[in-house]
Image: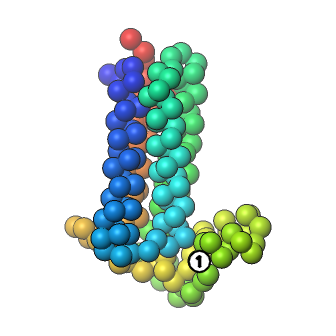
Amino acid sequence: MLRGRLPFLLGFLACAAAMAVALFYFQRHLGLEPCPLCIFQRISVMVLGALFFLGLLFGPTGLARRLFGLLLSLAALGGIGIALRHLWLQYGSHQELGCGPGLEFMLENDPLPKVIADVLRGTGDCGEIVWSLFGISIPGWTLLLLLGLLGLSLGILFGRER
């Protein structure tokens, strides 16, 4: 089953690959600028990547390993919630989303709780599907990644050490 540092390595590599695709393919090659919800999803993947990297470095055992598993699971669940909200705005809300300011502008002019609420409310950019593969948009693929990382995190949390 899951043992040692291997799950941490796999999780870190998955997060690094996802960020490379987001930055180099979507943003640089295709010229797609991320909407605020996309940025929040990227942050959740980066947090997961950092936690997996720390687990890889330290190789925690016992209670420390379970703590890493819990933190990873919580971070994955947060990202899953954001991705689900994004998918709801794209496919299910059928509401007209108005244009909104960029995340940088909001962070400079509003308190953080208001920024988070405004981002989760969504803007016109968040409801637009600009790329898909097999009928699945970018937040859909991000959701699949995060579900896989959640499974890996739960394996770290509840798996037996050998």
Closer to us: 62 or 135: 62
Looking at this view, is 35 or 128 the one in front?
35
Residue 17 position within the rendered picture, expressed as x and y whole percent measured from the top left:
33, 50
Q: Nearer the viewer, residue 115 or 31?
A: 31
Residue 16 is situated, as x and y percent measured from the top left of the image, at: 38, 47
Which residue extends farthest right? 111
Identify the residue shown where x is 50% and y is 23%.
Answer: 58
Q: Tell me if I can see residue 113 in this picture.
A: yes
Quadrant in the picture for the N terminus:
top left
Q: Position of residue 94 (x, y in %)?
A: 48, 83
Q: Residue at x 47, y 26 (%)?
A: 57
Q: Position of residue 88 (x, y in %)?
A: 47, 70
Task: Read off the residue under disc 1.
Answer: 102
Please tell me which residue is depicted at 34% across the width and 36% down the height of the picture: 10
Q: In the shown orientation, is residue 84 left or right of residue 11?
A: right
Give the number of marks: 1
